[in-house]
Image (spheres, rainbow, N blue to C red):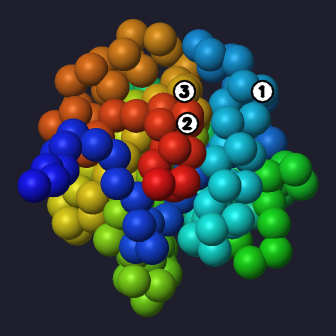
Amino acid sequence: MTTTDPNRLALGDDTALVLIDLQTGILALPTAKPSAGILAKGIELAGAFRARKLPVVLIKVAWSPDGGDLPTANVDRPGPAAAPPAAFSEIPAELAALGDVVVTKRHWGAFTGTELDLQLRRRGIHRIVLAGISTSVGVESTARTAWELSYDLVFAEDATADLDADSHAHTFGKIFPRIGKVSNTAEILAALDS
């Protein structure tokens, strides 16, 4: 009799890679882990998903040139007062590939006000491998909504970074284990191969 390890990472045809905000302007921010390494892991994961004909979804944040769709500023620590230049939202050429799904968001989370859920469900996706910048903002906001929408989640910790090391540690130590499986690039690649 064979038994299956319930903790073993399993990734099937119903899995997509969703990379959050790996774009020029965000990659230039002072992350706690070097963003060049995060981008390299994202490229590695994207290549593996594409090789298996699994969806790669690239999420970027951008706003209208007039700034009319910027988040409200009635907070203690407001975001940008004006829309950044278009170059801020460019996805690096070495990451993007023909056939990727590109979703533009205007909030922290990638589901709010976008077609992300539609794009995933129409492709039969039930499991998301999630990574990107920043852990406690875009990645965590997207993850919480995905969990509420009943997606299974896998987090690539070594392909995710925050501007603040404590925020990254809190999210990966306290939040993500409650809503998904914390993993790393090597384990995810191995699960894709099995």
State the image coordinates of residue 31 (x, y, percent, origin top left).
63, 19
Q: Residue at x 34, y 34 (%)?
A: 182
| Tag 2: amino acid | Thr
Q: In this figure, which residue is indicated by the disc labeled 1?
A: 36
Q: In this figure, which residue is indicated by the disc labeled 2?
A: 185
Q: Residue at x 56, y 45 (%)?
A: 189
Left or right placement of residue 118 versus residue 176 in this view: right
How crowded pointer 2 is (Cα within 10 Å; few <14, some 14-19, many 20+) is rated as some
Q: In this figure, which residue is indicated by the disc labeled 3?
A: 158
The single residue placed furthest to the left in the displayed view is 1
Kind of element beneath mark 1: helix
Between residue 60 and residue 150, name the one nearer to us: 150
Kind of element beneath mark 2: helix
Question: Closer to the camera: disc 2 or disc 1?
Answer: 2
How crowded pointer 3 is (Cα within 10 Å; few <14, some 14-19, many 20+) is rated as some
Q: Quadrant of residue 40?
A: top right
Q: How many marks?
A: 3
- Measure the alpha-carbon separation of dots 2 and 3: 7 Å
Between residue 88 and residue 160, name the one nearer to us: 160
* Residues under numbered marks 2 and 3 in contact, where contact means CB atoms less than 8 Å apart: yes
State the image coordinates of residue 149 (x, y, percent, origin top left).
22, 68
Q: Residue at x 46, y 49 (%)?
A: 191
Left or right placement of residue 30 versus residue 142 in this view: right
